Image: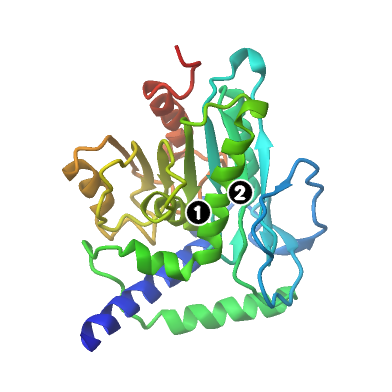
Amino acid sequence: MVMHSTIVSARRGVFRAAILLAAWSFAAPAFAQLNDTMTPIATPDQPNAIEIGTAPLPDAKAQESWHSQYGSKFARNVTVATITPFLPDAAKASGAAVVVAPGGGFRTLSMENEGWNVARALAERGVAAFVLKYRLNQTPADMPGFERSMKEMFSSTAARPRPTPGSPLDPQQAAAGLAPQLEDARAAFTLIRRRAAEWKIDRDRIGMVGFSAGAMLTLLTELAGQDAKPAFIGIIYGPLATVTVPADAPPLFVALAADDPFFANGGFGLIESWRAAKKPAEFHLYEQGGHGFGMYPKETTSTGWFDAFVSWLTMHGMAKPKG
């Protein structure tokens, strides 16, 4: 029993470290043309952000701060969770909605590339979108301290073995380590459903899409989110561990690049689990794209993930008004 517990704990630790590493270190060839220096910036105006009602992180010492990297904006040390609505024109609104969960290893949030830009594009296609700025693990307030802490974490992680393909994910254990973030995701669904009439949203057609760490949060929102119950989920370059699929599991969309340095070599257990349970699953494995491609303009076919996602939503009746 002790040995089993140790193995599970080690797998979970390596899994978290892989997500953190993925968030911090995008594939270099994919973003060679962009400035990878993290530059502190003023907190941008977020006039439409709505606090979702979860408590501020206890004992938080650092204030929320922002920086730019790869030509995009990132948030750090988020202690108060919000959602920012991006609503479509009434003339083309489908009535469906998506909670968008940016990635960042639960230490940063790629608010622009994996948040606002995704939500804006969804709204243009008639789907309401809500960018979830969830609470994060605390990091040093100053940028040099943050960089140093990340390097120290990676150096200690490098020697650890990675989980073998097919290693199952225990959602309850994973959820225990991400309790604040999962609480934020659940609260987002509760708030959107409560204001569904105001935002002209169908309460039964609210799904979730996440990127990297946000993809993990999206998966856990389905597997361990209790009352959240997304109508569909999108996993964009996230972990694909084997899971036990709920009897009422929603349609699943997955996009991953074959040269993703973190999640492309761990097997495709998540897709296989969904298919074995006879639940709808769509999987796009792009030849190139690295990790963290999101909405960045690139010359790889991975840029097609968004159009594929919208086509998939349309196929499931989410991108057009309910007849």
Q: Is residue 244 visible?
A: yes
Label 2 crowd bin: few (<14), some (14–19), many (20+), radius 10 Å: many
Give percent across and percent down for residue 212: 47, 55
Q: Amino acid at mark 1?
A: Gly
Q: What amino acid type should be assigned to the residue bearing mark 2? A: Leu
- The quarter of the picture where residue 183 lies is bottom right
* Residue at 83% in and 58% down: 42
Q: Position of residue 12 (x, y in %)?
A: 36, 72
Please say whether residue 114 is visible from this viewpoint: no
Identify the coloring: rainbow
- Give the class, few, some or many, for how many residues have Cα within 10 Å of label 1's Cα (few <14, many ≥20): many
Figure check: 302 above or below 8: above
Residue designated by label 2? 132
Quadrant housing the N terminus: bottom left
Relative placement, left or right, of 257 versus 196 is: left
Q: Residue furthest left?
A: 276
Task: Give SS at disc 2.
Answer: strand
The total number of labels drawn is: 2
Residue drawn at point x = 46 percent, y = 70 percent: 177
Quadrant of the rendering where the C terminus is positioned: top left
171 and 126: which is toward the camera: 171
Query: What residue is pinned by disc 1?
Result: 214
Residue 53 tag number: none
Residue 68, placed above or below residue 158: above
User: Disc 1, disc 2: CB below 8 Å?
Assistant: yes
Q: Quadrant of residue 24?
A: bottom right
Distance of mark 1 from mark 2, alpha carbons? 9 Å
- SS for dot 1: helix
- The residue sitting at 45% across, 24% down in the picture is 318
